[in-house]
Amino acid sequence: MSISATEAVTGGGLQALAPATTSATSPDKDMFLQLLVAQLRYQDPMNPADTGEFLSQSAQFTALEKMQDVADQTALVLGAQMAFGASSLVGREVSYTLADGTEGTGTVQGVTFEASGPVLDVDGTDVPLVNVLTVAGGASAATSAGSGTSSASTSATPARP
């Protein structure tokens, strides 16, 4: 639904714009829209706002929406990457630190995907992926670089968000 600036001002202000916004809009985006509508509502009729300025603000609002769309898509890609990364850890040995400070090591038995992110089942203990410190490789792993000996483990440290 598209609403012109005139309809927004004459048709009830922000209430007329409510259907055009979604529940996923950010507070900054809503505030920008409220300020723009207030500017139109309270302008001096004998000295209206410059149309160039209005178009500039509209372009900025559109750019903000597009940047939010890109950020949303990037978050989806990151979530998919985390899911694939977590599922590739099944059968591998990991070391971790839990929120209460306990440390442990074990083999990943499975992965569950929760709203907060992937959670590994490490020998019966639920470990969020972000708490994994190192991953020991399986049969396809290379030589550990720092030890000077050939072993079947390599270490990887995941990036922290």
Image: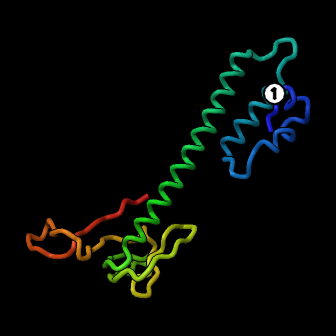
Residue 36 left/right relative to 80:
right
Q: Residue furthest left?
A: 148
Mark 1 residue element: helix
Splitting the image into 4 quarters, where does residue 154 fall?
A: bottom left
Looking at this view, is 113 or 46 the one in front? 113
Q: Which residue is painted at 34% across and 82% down in the image?
A: 107
Q: In this picture, is 58 found above or below 94?
A: above
Q: Which residue is painted at 82% across and 12% down in the image?
A: 47
Number of numbered markers: 1
Splitting the image into 4 quarters, where does residue 99 fall?
A: bottom left
Q: Which residue is painted at 74% across and 16% down in the image?
A: 51
Colour convention of the picture: rainbow
Residue 11 left/right relative to 114:
right
> Which quarter of the image is occupied by the C terminus?
bottom left
Q: Could you tell me residue 68's position as x and y percent?
A: 59, 43
Q: Residue furthest front?
A: 140
Q: Could you tell me residue 97's position as x and y percent?
A: 38, 75
Q: Could you tell me residue 138's position as x and y percent?
A: 26, 76
Residue 26 left/right relative to 43:
left
Q: Which residue is painted at 44% across and 87% down in the image?
A: 124
Does any portion of residue 103 appear in the rendered image?
Answer: no
- The residue where tag 1 is placed is 5
What amino acid is at disc 1? Ala
Q: Residue furthest top?
A: 46
- Mark 1 Cα within 10 Å, few/some/many (few <14, many 20+)? some
Does any portion of residue 133 appear in the rendered image?
Answer: yes
Splitting the image into 4 quarters, where does residue 122 fall?
A: bottom left
Q: In this picture, is 118 found above or below 16?
A: below
> Which quarter of the image is occupied by the N terminus?
top right
Looking at this view, is 12 or 140 the one in front? 140
Residue 30 left/right relative to 67:
right
Q: In this picture, is 22 found above or below 126?
A: above
